[in-house]
Image: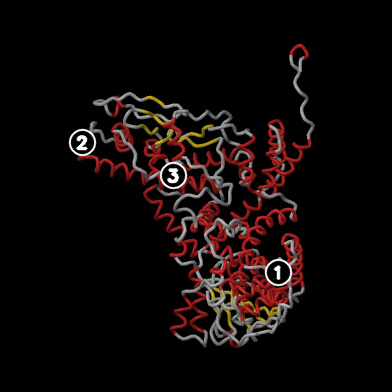
């Protein structure tokens, strides 16, 4: 996206006038957020109803079916109809009023502003081709963007096919213009320009969809966590200030002053979260100093000196204050919204005894039984047909050496879980992730059935999953979805890698071959296991015979490696989709970090029906090309992609009644009378 340079700079000589922050950032932030919320509401409410108008001569030249809406000092022309045009006009007017209040001076758009909202690539091409101020070179350059101002005019054009993205882009370009009018540019003052742009756009329309500069591949790969963090930032309903928690902590290798001098192409996802948090602090806590910050930064003053004077503390201390403020902010915002943070719920939970925890689970289940959210409707529809009795998951079977390697039938013996070798391997392979649910039900890929893996009523399991936004029974629904997804034609390869891993001495570990192969680490592969896979999947009994000579290992392992690649591609796609059935996000899985919205779109396209989606899923060997095509389709079909984002947003919103019910259940359990002590025989104590 690019904004055209239109008009000059508005530079105001505003001194800081000794504006000092209250000593309590939390108190100031609470007050500042309340004032900002009131200001946003007032800015929207004060907008006169935009009026439909006839197209002017310069607008008719495009020969597009445009609806024209006029507000004070601006026009919006949309191919998507009057409702979108009116909303865009109101948002633009509100952005101007909001920035005027925050910036301490009247803000204006370029005279004669016309914002064109174009809902198709065909409309974009027509607009660019027919615009009188654009030559061939400019048309080719702008066609590669999603939005742009037209140089030398007051025309702004937005041509994403998703209306939500068009509206978000309208505001981003509006704030780009307004801060540039104060001398704050994307190129020279990235930290303030982008920080305010994202923060104020989100304040008005609740989205973070438009990036004036995309994160470069080199920056995205600078830190192993960046890809996952970027994906979290893109999730519908993501709270960037929650994601920013800990990023200012002393333990992080990060220089706050460096952030003030980074160029757009140098920013990584964590940098964007930090500059967003810094802008939020200025608006919510240091609002009296914001006009002077804008003016002085725009005039070229040293940003460090400006921030230190505005906040009344050295930059090193400001970093510490930002860390503490972000830590407390979530709790204070939650309290203002009548909800509890994870930390508060966890503290309540830990104060309950075992009896109270069980009572809390019973109360939570009862309360959710009358909640009519989309998440719970899907849950009830699927689990209502679950088998009445579900067997406990057996230990994974192992390949029988007498069948698959009769020339060297080394006896197999299962190792106990308490065995030190098992403990070491389990610790290395099954790495815990706090974002992953605890499963009391799972899918047995060997036997092709849903199985029990734990106690579904265990209070710790229920509480952990509820904090993730998952109601009781979500793990059963996940397992049932996997059962629907299991492809009969891939049954053999999935079952083969569901066998237990064994070493060359015949020890059988409580881990599957699939889990071990997923580690990518070198491991012992006895002939009985390698040949067992080949025998089961390919029915090939004569090409390799135990003991397999060393010169034949490469060819054998190549075959097994290819089989595993197909097995993994198929299973991980299905696992990711099953987790997204009732959740807006999934357990981080390599290669899937940025695909949650695309996979949600896949669910939406199949009416959230596991049976319908199962019929649309590819074989493992085709999974990569399937995902590539899905991403490309979502880029072209913004309606489809928008459906995926809305599905995720719905599931995220459905977490609110779940958390409310959880908090109420904890309170009820804590307030209940303690059970009477059991009497001992003979009346003893």
Relative image position of residue 671 (x, y in whole percent): 78, 37
- The first of marks 2 and 3 along the sequence is 2
| Residue lying at 45% horizontally and 41% vertically, measured from the top left | 486
The answer to which of 22 and 408 lies nearer the viewer is 22
Above or below, comparing residue 364 to residue 68 in the picture: above
Give the crowd class for mark 1: few <14, some 14-19, many >=20 residues within 10 Å: many
Q: Tell me the element at label 3.
A: helix
Classify residue 457 as left or right of residue 661: left
Task: Between label 2 and label 1, give the one nearer the viewer.
Answer: 1
What is the quadrant of residue 402 in the picture? top left
- The first of marks 3 and 1 along the sequence is 1
- Mark 2 and mark 3 in contact? Answer it, CB < 8 Å: no
Give the crowd class for mark 2: few <14, some 14-19, many >=20 residues within 10 Å: few
What is the quadrant of residue 189 in the picture? bottom right
| Residue lying at 56% horizontally and 42% vertically, measured from the top left | 437
Q: Which residue is mark 3?
A: 571
| Residue lying at 68% horizontally and 36% vertically, measured from the top left | 361
| Residue lying at 68% horizontally and 72% vertically, measured from the top left | 310
Disc 2 versus disc 1: distance between alpha carbons? Answer: 74 Å
Q: Tell me the element at label 2.
A: loop
Task: Between label 3 and label 1, give the one nearer the viewer.
Answer: 1
The answer to which of 525 and 236 lies nearer the viewer is 525
The answer to which of 506 and 469 lies nearer the viewer is 506
- The first of marks 2 and 1 along the sequence is 1
The numbered dot on residue 286 is 1
Q: Which residue is mark 2?
A: 549
Relative image position of residue 191 (x, y in whole percent): 58, 71
Classify residue 234 as left or right of residue 412: right
Give the crowd class for mark 3: few <14, some 14-19, many >=20 residues within 10 Å: many
Q: Colour scheme used in the picture?
A: secondary structure
Disc 2 versus disc 3: distance between alpha carbons? Answer: 32 Å
């Amino acid at each position: 996206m690019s904004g055209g340079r239109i008009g000059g700079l508005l530079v105001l000589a505003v001194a800081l006038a000794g504006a000092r922050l209250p000593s309590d950032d939390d108190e100031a932030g609470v007050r500042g957020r309340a004032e900002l919320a009131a200001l946003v509401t007032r800015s929207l409410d004060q907008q006169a109803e935009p009026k439909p108008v006839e197209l002017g001569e310069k607008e008719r030249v495009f020969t597009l079916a445009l609806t024209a809406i006029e507000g004070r000092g601006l026009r919006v022309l949309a191919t998507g109809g009057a409702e979108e045009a009116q909303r865009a006009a109101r948002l633009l007017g509100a952005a101007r009023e909001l920035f005027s209040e925050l910036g301490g001076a009247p803000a204006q758009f370029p005279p004669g502003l016309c914002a064109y909202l174009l809902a198709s690539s065909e409309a974009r091409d027509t607009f660019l081709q027919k615009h009188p101020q654009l030559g061939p070179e400019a048309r080719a350059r702008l066609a590669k963007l999603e939005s742009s101002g037209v140089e030398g005019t007051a025309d702004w054009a937005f041509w994403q096919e998703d209306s939500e993205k068009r509206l978000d882009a309208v505001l981003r370009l509006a704030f780009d213009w307004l801060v540039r009018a104060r001398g704050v540019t994307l190129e020279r003052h990235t930290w303030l320009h982008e920080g305010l742009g994202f923060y104020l756009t989100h304040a008005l329309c609740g989205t973070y969809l438009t990036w004036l500069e995309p994160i470069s591949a080199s920056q995205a790969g600078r830190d192993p966590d960046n890809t996952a963090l970027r994906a979290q930032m893109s999730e519908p309903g993501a709270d960037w200030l929650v994601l920013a928690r800990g990023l200012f902590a002393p333990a992080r290798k990060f220089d706050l002053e460096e952030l003030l001098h980074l160029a757009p192409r140098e920013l990584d996802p964590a940098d964007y979260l930090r500059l967003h948090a810094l802008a939020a602090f200025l608006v919510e806590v240091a609002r009296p100093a914001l006009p002077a910050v804008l003016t002085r930064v725009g005039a070229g003053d040293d940003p460090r000196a400006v921030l230190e004077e505005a906040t009344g503390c050295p930059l090193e201390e400001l970093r510490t204050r930002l860390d503490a403020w972000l830590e407390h902010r979530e709790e204070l915002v939650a309290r203002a919204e009548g909800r509890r943070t994870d930390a508060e719920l966890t503290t309540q939970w830990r104060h309950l005894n075992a009896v109270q925890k069980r009572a809390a689970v019973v109360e939570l289940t009862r309360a959710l039984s009358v909640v009519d959210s989309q998440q719970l409707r899907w849950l009830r529809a699927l689990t209502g047909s679950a088998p009445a009795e579900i067997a406990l998951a057996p230990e994974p079977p192992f390949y029988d050496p007498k069948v698959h390697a009769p020339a060297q039938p080394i006896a197999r013996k299962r190792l106990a879980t308490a065995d030190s070798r098992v403990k070491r391997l389990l610790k290395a392979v099954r790495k815990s992730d706090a974002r992953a649910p605890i499963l009391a039900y799972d899918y047995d890929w060997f036997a092709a059935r849903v199985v029990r893996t734990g106690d579904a009523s265990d209070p710790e399991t229920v509480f952990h999953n509820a904090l993730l936004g998952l109601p009781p029974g979500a793990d059963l629904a996940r397992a049932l979805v996997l059962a629907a997804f299991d492809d009969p034609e891939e049954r053999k390869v999935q079952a083969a890698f569901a066998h237990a891993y064994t070493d060359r001495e015949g020890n059988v570990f409580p881990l599957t071959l699939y889990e071990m192969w997923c580690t990518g680490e070198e491991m012992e592969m006895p002939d009985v296991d390698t040949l067992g896979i080949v025998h089961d999947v390919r029915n090939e009994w004569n090409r390799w015979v135990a003991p397999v000579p060393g010169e034949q290992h490469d060819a054998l392992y190549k075959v097994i490696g290819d089989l595993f690649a197909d097995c993994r591609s198929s299973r991980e796609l299905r696992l990711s989709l099953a987790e997204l059935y009732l959740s807006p996000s999934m357990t981080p899985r390599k290669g899937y970090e940025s695909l949650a919205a695309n996979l949600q779109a896949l669910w939406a396209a199949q009416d959230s029906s596991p049976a319908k989606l199962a019929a649309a899923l590819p074989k493992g060997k085709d999974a990569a090309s399937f995902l590539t095509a899905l991403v490309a389709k979502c880029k072209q079909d913004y309606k489809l992609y928008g459906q995926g984002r809305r599905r995720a947003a719905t599931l995220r919103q459905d977490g609110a009644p779940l958390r409310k019910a959880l908090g109420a259940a904890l309170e009820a359990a804590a307030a209940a009378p303690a059970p009477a002590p059991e009497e001992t025989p003979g009346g003893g104590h």
